[in-house]
Image (tube, coloured by chain):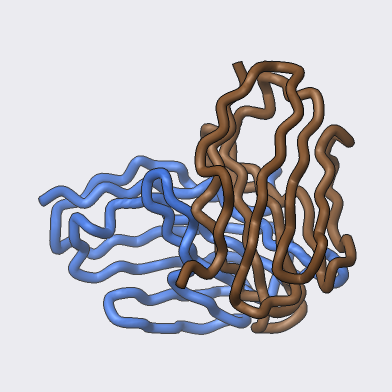
Chain colours: A brown, B blue
Amino acid sequence: DTAVSQTPKYLVTQMGNDKSIKCEQNLGHDTMYWYKQDSKKFLKIMFSYNNKELIINETVPNRFSPKSPDKAHLNLHINSLELGDSAVYFCASSLGLAGVSSTDTQYFGPGTRLTVL
Amino acid sequence: QKEVEQDPGPLSVPEGAIVSLNCTYSNSAFQYFMWYRQYSRKGPELLMYTYSSGNKEDGRFTAQVDKSSKYISLFIRDSQPSDSATYLCAMSGTSGTYKYIFGTGTRLKVLA
């Protein structure tokens, strides 16, 4: 019954490694997002996809590459991990595009806690 | 100046108190206003969703939007220890941006 799921839940890795986080939603939504939440709880949008098309690409280093194989999945690949990448990464989904109508209500996954050593 | 300002707290109140959480914003184009609750080590969950100005009530929770003052509030009546969490406000609706802007969150602790 999980609406938005993410794997893995925890990720501990060394600087310089490459890692991926996967996200799946079973809500039938068209739009998916990746957010980064820092230690002060600030939640910042990184990317969004609508019907597999990239809509938002915030000022994120190009070491971060999202991939949406279909509407229900949005994965995040990170190359050459750095200490500053340590954070909690949240996936979210909504029926419509954020800010366009009331169908933009976003539902969040449980988060992936990334620690870079 | 950040687009959305929110007092980080922590805010400690006794059980049964009325809690008032607030956000101010600078962009008058915002039309949709949300409150999310986030428990420790969990994802944010939507509490309230309001379009434009006015009040919305759901059980012990009331959301208020005052667009003229660029100010939104969340009131929690008869607060319970289970309400202890971080509360995040979020806004959207600026043309063509297609994203939520979140406040930094207010940490609330309700003491039994």
Query: In the visual, does B105 lie left or right of A99?
Result: left
Q: Residue at point 60% right, 82% down?
A: B51
Query: In the visual, does B16 lie left or right of A31?
Result: left
Looking at this rendering, what residue extends furthest in the left direction?
Answer: B112
Along the line of sight, the residue nearer the viewer: A81 or B62: A81
| Quarter the C terminus of chain A occupies | top right
Along the line of sight, the residue nearer the viewer: B16 or A57: A57
Q: Number of callouts in the render? A: 0
Above or below — where is A91 with respect to A20? Answer: below
Q: Position of residue B38 (x, y in %)?
A: 43, 54
Along the line of sight, the residue nearer the viewer: A28 or B45: A28
| Quarter the N terminus of chain A occupies | bottom left
Q: Quadrant of residue A60?
A: top right
Q: Position of residue B68 (x, y in %)?
A: 62, 73
Q: Residue at point 35% right, 41% down?
A: B10
Q: Residue at point 24% right, 70% down?
A: B77
Q: Position of residue A25 (x, y in %)?
A: 62, 68
Query: In the visual, does B71 lie left or right of A97?
Result: left
Q: Position of residue B31 (x, y in %)?
A: 68, 76
Q: Quadrant of residue B17?
A: bottom left
Q: Residue at point 49% right, 66% down?
A: B35
